[in-house]
Image (tube, helix red, strand yellow):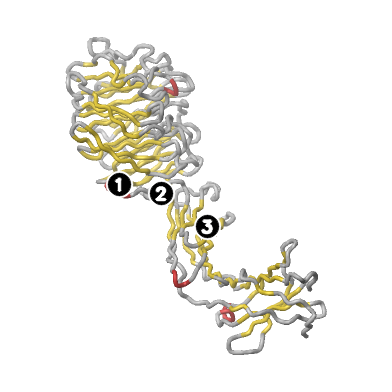
Amino acid sequence: MSNPNLPTPTIDAATYYDVASQQLHLVITYPSGVAIWPNDIVVNLIAPSSATPTKVGNGAPTFTANTKTGTIVMPLALASASQGGQLTVASLDTSWESSSPSDPWMIPAINSSPFTSVPTASFTSLGSVEVTWSWIQKMGATAQQVTLTIAGQTPVTTMVKSPDVTATFTMAQAKNLFMPGKKVAIQCIPIAPGLWATPVNTTFSIPKSSAMTSISLNTPPLLSSECTMTSLSVQGTNTMQVWWGTPEGAIETAEFPLQRFHPETAQFASASTVSDTGSCLASVSVNSTKQLVWWITETGAIDGQVNSGKGWASPGTGPGEAYPFNEAGTASTANGGSMTSLLLGNNGTILFWVDAKGAIGCCRWFASSGWQAVFDALPPGTASATTQLTTLSVGSTAYLFCVSPDGAIVGGSWSDANSGTLGLMSPVAVAPLNSAAPDGGLTSISVNAREIAVLWTTPKNSIDIAFLFEEPYSFRNFQRPLTVSQSVLGGTGIAVYSMEANQYSVWWIGQSSDLRRTNVDFTKVSSTPTPDWPVFEEVGPDSCKKMRSLLVQKVSGTQVDVFYVNAKGAVAGLSYES
């Protein structure tokens, strides 16, 4: 029965029909002059083929505090909604008398045509899952609700308004459950005026590398806090050896024969580095019968051992055999010091280090004459006290790079490093001041006979890369981001290796203390100003410790090993087969 004295509500534009749940989400408002209204409303449907209203349902809307606007959800079968038609509402009092019906609300057309392209998901350098799509303009969608679900967890939902086309789900939102191979469910619901359309469902698995095996030691050793590991692969043996510093200041090692991933550890040298802090280590394999390992002692001297084919031992004391840099005060011990080495063909090596004044100290060894005199390769004030060093050689030219005190990437090149004298140094400016985090990762790799790449951690905790091209009397370079801001855990290292032609893998520790890898085509970096390289979650969240030690070592023609420090502060690794 109709009662014209009852107030009539209006249907708001926020009303919509949800195809997935087959429910009507009705929003109504009473006129401004109305102070009192019945608790209930009644909803009627006028089908296109009939002028007679059919009752859909009745109930009490929930009103927002201090407003005249209320909402109610009631079932409406998809079969009925798909026919179209109009809906009206009226207030309903306790005697079942109703007001005059409202102006009608047209049910939107429901069809099977998609509102967007098929959504795709990817894993980013930030450790997030991104869902992207494109809008089909003629369908009129204004937004999309995207939900990510992990089994056993509360779904995470976000709303994306057109013209934006990306929904991002962070590692924190996923409660650090974006683990290698983890499957997630993704649902996308296109939204048009008055309609939440048919949802599109898909699944996505967090990418991880195939042909990868975990490496562990029988008795996982702890590392000193500022230690950087070093490793060697002995030519022709399919064997590699890793060294690290212990919290007590000693040096330990483990040898990894091919396919045996549970070796025992052994003490290599007694306590001599700064306890707790430890030391940067460096090593080089000149040939199958000449390998060298060095570390910085607590006095700033550089000590080490030599393997001349008869096992590891201290260097000799004769001319050219004794280490001229094994003197107190030679190297800085701040933050474990910084040191690196470079192979010169198959008959020599150069050892570089940072001294207490920020100079780059240097000493060369030749098979024909032994160790030469110590001298400064780069002057005092060149290097930050917390920089890492990286070196490489292309032909007879040697390169060294470091982070300066003002955050620039600087270095030098020596065009004839094999000569009796190191020759004239050419300064190399890679990136301007404030480009690098002083305690961040730094590494380099040769791209071809005239091009090298330098990678570093920025103050925004991302990884940038610069390509340097050698030209007569000069260098030219360009710089690009490889990962996005806050993708890297500050104070950790970077490793890079060429897996195949033009394909380079870069490893780093993520903000979630996880180990990530990206695969980059160096030939396409110049045309990729926004990083979108494929990213793999190699070791899950909370698995790595914040330390600068991260290294990659070729073991054989088909095997590459990566070593990092796990959450317990012990040596751990991954082995990749190709």
Of labels 3 and 2, the one closer to you: 3
| Residue type indicated by callout 1 | Ser
Q: Residue at x 54, y 47 (%)?
A: 172
Estimate the x, y position of residue 78 in percent, counting from the top left: 57, 77
Residue drawn where x is 47% and y is 50% of the image: 128
10 Å crowding of disc 3: few (<14), some (14-19), many (20+):
many
Relative to 47, residue 439 above or below = above
Instruction: State whether residue 217 appears in this view.
Output: no
Quadrant of the frame with the N terminus: bottom right
Secondary structure beneath label 1:
helix
Q: Residue 275 in the image: x percent, y percent?
A: 47, 19
Front-lying residue, 249 or 172 = 172
Decide if residue 466 is in sight here: yes
> In the rendered image, which residue does mark 2 sit on?
208
Q: Earlier in the sequence, mark 3 or mark 1?
A: 3
The residue that label 1 is drawn on is 526
**Front position in the image: 215 or 445:** 445
Disc number lying in front (2 or 1) = 1
Pointers 3 and 1 in contact (CB under 8 A)? no
Q: Secondary structure at mark 2?
A: loop
Residue 166 percent location from the top left of the image: 47, 57
Is residue 344 rendered to the left or right of residue 224?
left
Query: Mark 3 to mark 2: distance in Å?
Result: 19 Å
- Give the amino acid type for the residue marked by disc 3 in the picture: Leu
Residues packed near mark 2 inside 10 Å, few (<14), some (14 to 19) or many (20 plus): some
Q: Which residue is mark 3?
A: 148
Q: Earlier in the sequence, mark 3 or mark 2?
A: 3
Report crowding for label 1: few under 14, some 14 to 19, many 20 or more residues within 10 A (C-alpha).
few
- Mark 2 vs mark 1, CA separation in Å: 26 Å
Q: Which residue type carries mark 2?
A: Lys
